[in-house]
Amino acid sequence: MEVILNLASVQGNILKYNQILKKSDQLIKQNLEDKKQDSIRKEGRSHQLEISDPIVEIENLTLEYDGKPAIIDILIDIPKNHATAVIGPSGCGKSTLLRCLNRLNDLIDGVTIEGSVKISGEDIYDSNIDVTELRKRVGMVFQKSNPFPKSIYENVAYGPRLSGIKNSTDLDEIVENSLNGAALWEEVKDRLGESALSLSGGQQQRLCIARAIAVEPEVLLMDEPCSDLDPIATGKIEDLITELKQNYTIVIVTHNMQQAARVSDYTAFMYLGRIIEYDITENIFLRPTNKQTEDYVSGKFG
Amino acid sequence: MSVITRLKDVEDKIYLQSAFKSRIKRKRQIADFFARLVVTSGGIAIILSILAILFFITIEVIPLWRGVKADLSGRFDIKQTAGIAIIITDDTPFNKPIPIFAIGLDEYREIGFIITKTGKINFISLKDGSIIKQVPLSKIEGKNVSSIFESSNNKQYALGTEDGYVLPVEINFKVSFTQEGKRIIEPRLFEGEPFLVESITLNKLAYNQSSDDSRAAAVITSDGRLVFVSVETSSSLISDEIKNLFKHDLTSGLKGDNVTSLELDSFLDNLYVGTKEGRLYHWSVSDKQNPKLVDVISATAPPGTPLTALGFLLGDRSLIVGDASGVVSVWFQVEDETSPIGRKLQKIHHFKSHNQPITNIASSSRDRSFLSADSSGNISLHHATSNQTLLQLSTEGSSIVAIAFAPKANGILAIDQKGVFYDWDIDNPHPETNLKTLFGKVWYEGYSKPDYVWQSTGGTDEFEPKLSLTPLAYGTLKGALYALIFAIPLSLLGAICVSQFMHPSMRNVIKPIIEIMAALPSVVLGFFAGLWLAPYIEKIIPAVFLMPLVITILTLVAMILWKYLPKFIHARFREGTEFFLLIPIIILGILISIWLNTPLENMLFGGDYRNWLFEVLGLQYDQRNALIVGFAMGFAVIPIIFSIAEDALSNVPKHLTAGSLALGANRWQTAIKVVLPTASAGISSAIMIGLGRAVGETMIVLMATGNTPIMDWSIFNGFRALSANIAVEIPEAPHGGTLYRVLFLAALLLFFVTFVLNTAAELVRQRLRKKYGQL
């Protein structure tokens, strides 16, 4: 009987010890994590590139959804007329960062933003900034192609019309140039009046690009523009990006590392809301300085 | 041993498990089967019940279009059965000495009577034609009858004798029941006081008596004179009767025409004379001392075709005219300023020609039907209001000498020159309806022109039912239109505001509140609108029309002020909640408008807007009018349109709005250019469903309008909607009657309209959905 009682108390003790062990383990882990975060932050800053001609300057940008930070302390400059890729695992804040650049995050409830984003030297979070004007300067192409349920022509003319262009010859010219710019003109020039929804997925996405460049933005944001497309359509869009970066500054968020390697000049690697490493694309993929970057680009996690 | 049992246990378990599994599988199959059965039968039951409603409404309506049925129920030669001789002296339909003057029958169609030249009333059984009894007319006993007049109610007769007397006679039937429940019909004869007109044979006679015991007769004597006699009887306290007798010889007015027929109405106002020369003479005899020839009309085409028969329709206001070419027409007096009596006789309806001279006319004492018979033995049944010939009967080819309509309009009696007596069963329950009377313009008795009129019942039996559904359909559309004019802008703008601009937390409050509005019983809304709102609005009409202007101006001013307000005040309102600030501004706008009401009315409308409306715009102001219905029904329709439209707008994919915003559009531009077109399918079905509700709505239109079936788009007039009409009239519509069926037709029409609206809504929705379907 006594033996049994003893055994029971031993069992109770073991349980207690277990709990204590777990707790301490958690503490240690947390500590380690904190240290890691710290090192990440330091490393992020140490890897800051010197960009000679930045068009977008992001300084200490932190964004919180209802008090939960989504991106933390971002500090990068984005060079003019180059393609800059942002890579990183899902949920690391790539898209959020992108949406900070045209203030599309404003629409979401409970968002607070700190830090500054300058485009062409102008702080876009300044209270005097006209958001609609800003969005004309910073075009965006979304992950899912979203042509309006209007004709192909009207889709492209939508932005210019908002800017007050009414003359039909001007509009025709803009539409043709933009569709040419998006390498779509030859495919749709005979059916501009047809619904945009009659186009294939890849064509729809290129139409969205045409629509975005019709207002001649300074910066073109692309949020995983090829994630819904097949390889052929993806190839076309990638060629287009290479083409477009002659005239536009492109910031592209992508999951596809080959794509980033193919189209971008600079690449930023984000993890858990922070920029871990930012460098010339070649360096990121061939000579990453950070262990996490190396793990990610070599496919060890993500 | 234990190992074996354990193994067995395991085996059992496995077996049980598999059994359990198969049982579950079967259970699931059964449940699946029953679920499918219940769901399918539920769906079929709904479809069937709708079809059943449609079917039963249609069943009630179809008899309106059923033709007239006639069966020859009796035919006998009265010379053989009753021993009544027919004397044929002259075959021409006019100016003929008539052997048999008149025939008639009781309301159960058991006993008929024949009035002959000898001054005897012969009652005969309609079963076999045998004589029941012969009653001599005691007051003119021994005299030969030379002419007869039959009043349009088929009860009163007047006999003219060869020595110039006129005897009023009334024949009716006393119906009693024995203890065994057997029906006994006893014919009764009342003779009035005979009075002398001229001591000469009276060849033709028209006689009538008015309710105040005045009597009048017009006669054609054997020497061709037209004489009008009136006898006035008045009672006083001292003496019993003072008789005023006026006699006028009107022959000079005839210009030598030969009179073929005479008619005198029961008001003793109008004397109509038809002549062989085809002219219709109209004397106004309301002033008994001084009869006036009002009009001489060439009534036939080609001119000169002899008129052969005259008769009155029920009510003695419409004159039926038959001529020698077989044409039958209906005439009545229409307002005309050129006429000395202010009204002029006009031909209103004409019917299918007999192509043979008309010999007799008899009108129904139930409705506006009448019979015309010709010299070849053909009989036609016409209906005046609907302008249609319902039935054509033919006999054995001899000229019809007398004809009678059964009191219940369910039988026809006729007798021809050879003494053959015919008795038809008639089934003619709904003579007054056809597409024209239900939907077209009809020239009703006493109206100055053809018109769309709904007036189903009147004060007297002689009333002409006016059953045009057009003013009712018009009322329904008018009500729905004014309701939608009020509801569409408010509900759609509200839906755009709530879905696109408001903070979601406010949307979650406002939407349910507006949806509760739909739960308000419409009878409460109607009661409120009719009894409180209507009198109140009547007081402040100028303010009501001022309100939109004042509120718009105040809102614009408030928005401009808001823009220049310091930032810290802005900061107190979360984005999307600043709309609350508009509530006091709108209330202020309403108050300012009401406050401005009297000054405005004094300044612009001379102190009384109703007077101004009437004099300047020619509009009548009804207290319960389309404006009130617009408000009340708008209130009922707004939640429906709002709720569906708001859902449609909220369901526009976010990536589309984001795409538009990313191109530099502001929220308003995005809402108008991207969200609204994308949600157009839902919005259009919202409006259609709202329209459907407005069309079918009953209690509000019933209580908030005056229910006058007029056709006028004026917002200040009331109207009567189909639905309200059914509610108002179904309690007074006798089961199976024409009105009852017409009301069912109105229901069918309503059903049809809502069906068409819903189908159209669905088609539009499908089309738009297809257009925007890939989203």
Image (tube, rainbow, N blue to C red):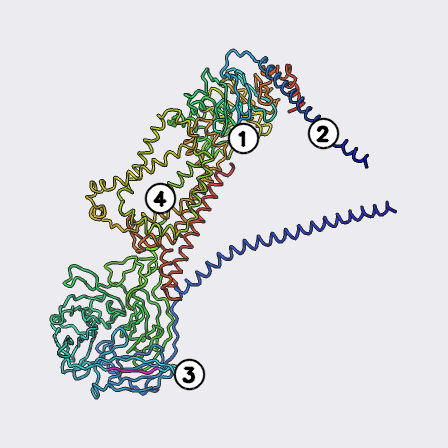
Side of A127 relative to B389 (left or right): right
Label 1 belongs to which residue? A144
Callout 4: 10 Å neighbours few (<14), some, many (20+)? Answer: many
Does residue B331 sit above or below B748 in this rendering?
below
- Foreground mark, 3 or 2, reads 2
Numbered mark located on residue B486 in the image: 4
Callout 1: 10 Å neighbours few (<14), some, many (20+)? Answer: some
Q: Are marks 4 and 3 in contact (CB under 8 Å)?
A: no
Q: Are marks 3 and 2 in contact (CB under 8 Å)?
A: no
Q: Are marks 2 and 4 on the same chain?
A: no
Callout 2: 10 Å neighbours few (<14), some, many (20+)? Answer: few
Label 3 belongs to which residue? B180
Q: Position of residue B84 (x, y in %)?
A: 30, 86
Q: What amino acid type should be assigned to the residue bearing mark 1?
A: Lys
Q: Are marks 4 and 1 in contact (CB under 8 Å)?
A: no
Does residue A83 sit above or below B454 in this rendering?
above
Distance CA(mark 2)–CA(mark 4) = 73 Å
Residue B189 falls within the magenta-colored stretch = yes
Q: What amino acid type should be assigned to the residue bearing mark 4?
A: Phe
Distance CA(mark 2)–CA(mark 1) = 52 Å
Identify the secondary structure beneath mark 2: helix
User: Tag 1 or tag 2, which sits nearer the N-term?
Assistant: 2
Where residue B350 sits, quadrant-wise, is bottom left
Residue B330 visible in the shown view? yes
